[in-house]
Image (cartoon, rainbow, N blue to C red):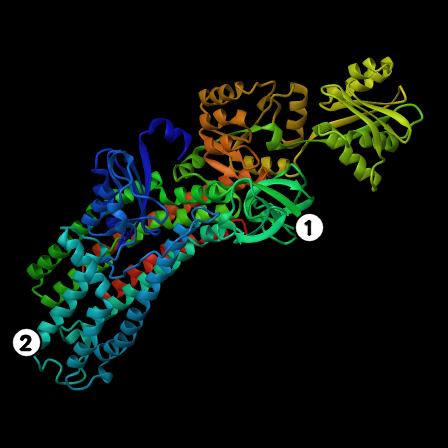
Amino acid sequence: MSTKELLGQSATRIIELDIEGMTCASCVGRVERKLTKLDGVEASVNLPLESARVTAPEHISDQEIIDTVNKTGYKAHLKPGQRTASPAGSSSESTAAATNPVSESPEGITLHPGDHHSSSAGTLDEKGSNEGARRSAASVLKPRLILAAVLSLPIVVISMIPGAQFPHWGWVAFALALPVVTWSGWPFHRAAAINARHFASTMDTLVSLGVIAAFLFSAWQLFTNPTITAHTGINMGDHSLYFEVAAVLVTFLLLGRYLEARAKARAGDALKALLDLGAKEATVLRDGVEKLIPADQLEKGDVFVVRPGEKLATDGVVIEGNSAIDTSLVTGESVPVEVSAGNAVTGATINTSGRLLVKATRVGSDTTLAQMGRLVSQAQSGKAPIARLADRISAVFVPIVISISVLTFLLWMIFSGDLGSAFTASVTVLVIACPCALGLATPTALMTGTGRGAQLGILIKGPQVLEDTRTVNAILLDKTGTVTSGRLEVTDVTALGDTHAEEVLARAGAVEAASEHPIARAIAEAAKHGAGTELPHVSNFHSAPGGGVRGVVDGAVILAGRPGWLENNDVSIPDDYRAIFTRQQESGATAIYVAQNGRMVGVISLKDTIKENSAAAIAKLKKLGLRPLLLTGDNKEVAQQVAAQVGIAPEDVFADVLPEGKVDAVKRLQEQGLTVAMAGDGVNDAAALAQADLGIAMGSGTDVAIEAADLTIMGNDLNQVAQAIELSRSTLSTIKMNLFWAFAYNTLGIPIAALGLLNPIIAGGAMAASSVLVVLNSLRLRKFGK
């Protein structure tokens, strides 16, 4: 739950439910309406995930929520790992059965979660349970589908091809259709019956009514006139038997449901793959002895060993060793990150070279991977504002369709008197109008888009974010850590007198190597890289905080630091040397003086370098219709130089901005009528991220920044910011496309069916195809960024 939500809903809690038996948008709407009738309860129900995310006040117990869903005609239970709560927050053992139900599912499919244990991924078990449920749904439907297909084929052949008919073929068609309509079609009939007991109707109601009506009408015709098919050569237009319609409807609809179940499972594959990244085992170091244990048994403070090629079992800090860490599985960035003692590392990343000893700082549900899983899961469980229209329509859709079907039958009888045509038209209306595509349009696209984003290191906090990315037209970029690397690098070495630049850097690097200051580390790294060998040994090392360092290298006393500190150590600085120092500072560099045996020998300049892809990323943001603006606490000259290098206009630079002034900068832009996105990575960015219309946290930043943001980029590449906005817009576009075709299908299909221009068999195939096509259209998002 976000910080914003916590501020306004401190007396509420989040409950996540698995719900069995939902098949269409009408089911979703009915469950939501029943839950929201409870005092203070808000609910968002997700059809593909077969789950609900419920916000409830403390005085409403978990059991009351579960009972409300059960009374609606479905079966609910808490997701594994959650404890039930009674009013006043006390634990309630009476609801234990609800967490592992043996239930009657309206779909005729009983699915039970197995025993689950905690894992380093946090939400892996819950997602694994849902994934298994969807796979199980497909496996249960498969034998029913096979039987229906095998028996329907001969029914269609003898009913529609005169040359294949034989005396009394109608009785054979009846015998073959009976198991198809009853056993194969049982999931539809059972769901319709359970819903009817609760005075409700759903897509299954329409399917069941259509199939039963076609079969019973045909059986009545056959039993009242047993010789109706006594002669061969009768085509389907010469009789009133619709056994082939009933059988093929069941087959098509089962095929659609089966393909839908498999496709929905695929839509969740990205999140499952993300959560499966976690290491399964860890080599923990206890009392000096290495011991292999399950990763979920790691405790905070444990020290574990990571050998080359192994995954890090959890988040931690390196306490010994040097290596390069492949973070691509989590951040989406392909370049390995060099780490050594003191560097933070993330669980599920891969150690590519040296042996590391890591101290666990986060375990279980607190890890970065678990947080990623929760953010994606919450986004998938939410509901985009655009989906509310589908919910409102589906709430009244089925009763209206049944009314239209009855009216169609009556009008055909009044104006034509043809019982067969009246029956065919009314059944076709029932079949063509099933609103399953509406229920799948939004959540399948949301599941696929957010899952793909997670694979790319992009976390979308909720469905509302999709709407926000559509309207954003300006993006405020924090300079340090976002546009620039946030790390100082040596950019220039000026040698004075007869000293060589390489010698200046090597001597200064040797002394600085003994210091932990960021400037010292940058100089030491540059010196080591330039020398290509180990740096000379330093003795008599001394560090003065805020001043500089001193040490003896190869018998010479080397000082490196600021001018004032060198003067305090009896080093004379001529005016022309001061001019060099001043020029470097004016260019935006940090300048360090180097002296040897009391004499000035050089100046080393360092800058916070611009990230390699920043200019290309900003060009891409412009192409997406966003106006990039730069925000920094640095002086105007430095800010303008950075802006010029990455392609930001001079008038779009906010310089000399204090941390508390970042919020004011966002507000000023909003007052100008701009819809503002803000990208940042630090604690001092959190308030501005929350103020912005769209907050984007760079994943290298702090938890506070990530919590305040709407989008989180797990990597450090500004290109991912543009990619995140592009993915969000693509997901929203897919949702709109799905909804358009779902609405268009029903809007066009019902009047065509009512006019008798559509055969029930074709209607059944089209209805099943519509659901599958909506899911397949959503699955196109899996290829985003490839």
Instruction: Give the camera-side residue of 229 and 204.
Output: 204
Image-quadrant location for residue 681: top right
User: Is mark 2 in CB contact (under 8 Å) with mark 1?
Assistant: no
Q: Is residue 684 left or right of residue 495?
A: left
Instruction: Give the labeled residue for mark 2.
Output: 224
Is 128 on the left or on the right of 620, as rendered? left
x, y (%) of residue 494? 84, 26
x and y, in percent, of residue 348 in the image: 55, 48
Q: Quadrant of residue 568?
A: top right
* Placement of 204 over or under 566, stated as above or below: below
Q: Where residue 701 sits: x, y (%)?
A: 56, 33
Residue 548, by quadrant, is top right
Q: Secondary structure at mark 2?
A: helix
Q: Residues within 10 Å of mark 1 (few under 14, many from 20)?
A: some
Q: Which residue is mark 1?
A: 353
Q: Which residue of the protein is positioned furthest toward the front in this rendering?
A: 287
Quarter placement of the N terminus? top left
The local secondary structure at tag 1 comes to loop
Q: Amino acid at mark 2?
A: Thr
Q: Position of residue 218 (x, y in %)?
A: 13, 72
Residue, x 11% and y 69% (percent of image)? 217
- The CA span between labels 2 and 1 is 83 Å
